[in-house]
Amino acid sequence: AQSVTQPDIHITVSEGASLELRCNYSYGATPYLFWYVQSPGQGLQLLLKYFSGDTLVQGIKGFEAEFKRSQSSFNLRKPSVHWSDAAEYFCAVGPPGFQKLVFGTGTRLLVSP
Amino acid sequence: DAGVIQSPRHEVTEMGQEVTLRCKPISGHNSLFWYRQTMMRGLELLIYFNNNVPIDDSGMPEDRFSAKMPNASFSTLKIQPSEPRDSAVYFCASTLGQSSEQYFGPGTRLTVT
């Protein structure tokens, strides 16, 4: 069965510092991979997605993620964090051509001044 | 575009009462998803519809839960009778076609006392 692991429940980063959020997945073939962000009291918003091709994908708000098949990982990065990036981030995996997604448990990002 | 609309945004009810959550997907979208989010279990897919037809309801926790999509612009999730363990945030999401972004509504926060 497919699964997603986000090992960090909370991460605190200073404003202006770089960020990396970890995501590992379990799936029998190359899945579709997603990162979503959820601000307090809001629904989830898609940051970026990987289906195929270039393993480094660019998303909105200056985020990027790199798919590493050998490590079954899809880590999210941002070179310089802004206070408005404080939110919860979810990694999700789904089989190709299908819409049923499995979400990780989320990582809550705190940004310190 | 108004986005995915959910109502009510907050619902407080007593154990044993019937609860109905409502969702209006984005116009033109042909797939609709119901999720439940709790601290303990994270984000879980309950059921999804494609062209108004339920495709996979394996995530529905038990017979107390039911979902309908009578037309392309409206869906309901009903819990009868409700129990305190049903307290959660329920999200609706919609998408157009396969392999595309799921657009989430703002969620309904349900509290069962």
Image (spheres, coloured by chain):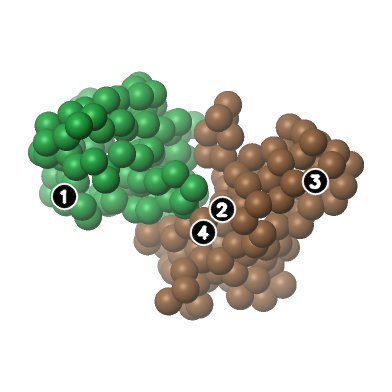
Chain colours: A green, B brown
2 or 3: mark nearer the eye: 3
Q: Where is residue A51 in the image (x, y as percent from the top left)?
A: 27, 51
The amino acid on which the numbered mark 4 sits, given as a three-letter code, is Gly
Picture quadrant of residue B8: bottom right
Q: Position of residue B64 (x, y in %)?
A: 82, 44
Q: Do labels 4 and 2 share a chain?
A: yes
Q: Which residue is drawn at 87% across and 47% down?
A: B17
- Mark number, residue B107: 2
Picture quadrant of residue B44: top right
Picture quadrant of residue A8: top left
- Distance between the alpha carbons at the discs numbered 1 and 3: 42 Å
- Mark number, residue B13: 3
Q: Are marks 1 and 3 in contact (CB under 8 Å)?
A: no
- Distance between the alpha carbons at the discs numbered 1 and 2: 26 Å
Q: Are marks 4 and 3 in contact (CB under 8 Å)?
A: no
The amino acid on which the numbered mark 1 sits, given as a three-letter code, is Gly
- Kindly identify which residue carries mark 4: B105
Mark 1 Cα within 10 Å, few/some/many (few <14, many 20+)?
few
Q: Residue at x 36, y 30 (%)?
A: A107
Q: Which residue is drawn at 79% across and 36% down?
A: B113
Chain letter for mark 2, please.
B
1 or 3: mark nearer the eye: 3
- Asked whether residue B11 appears in the rendered view, the answer is yes
Q: Where is residue B105 in the image (x, y as percent from the top left)?
A: 51, 59
> Dot 4 lies on which element?
loop
The amino acid on which the numbered mark 2 sits, given as a three-letter code, is Gly
- Distance between the alpha carbons at the discs numbered 1 and 4: 23 Å
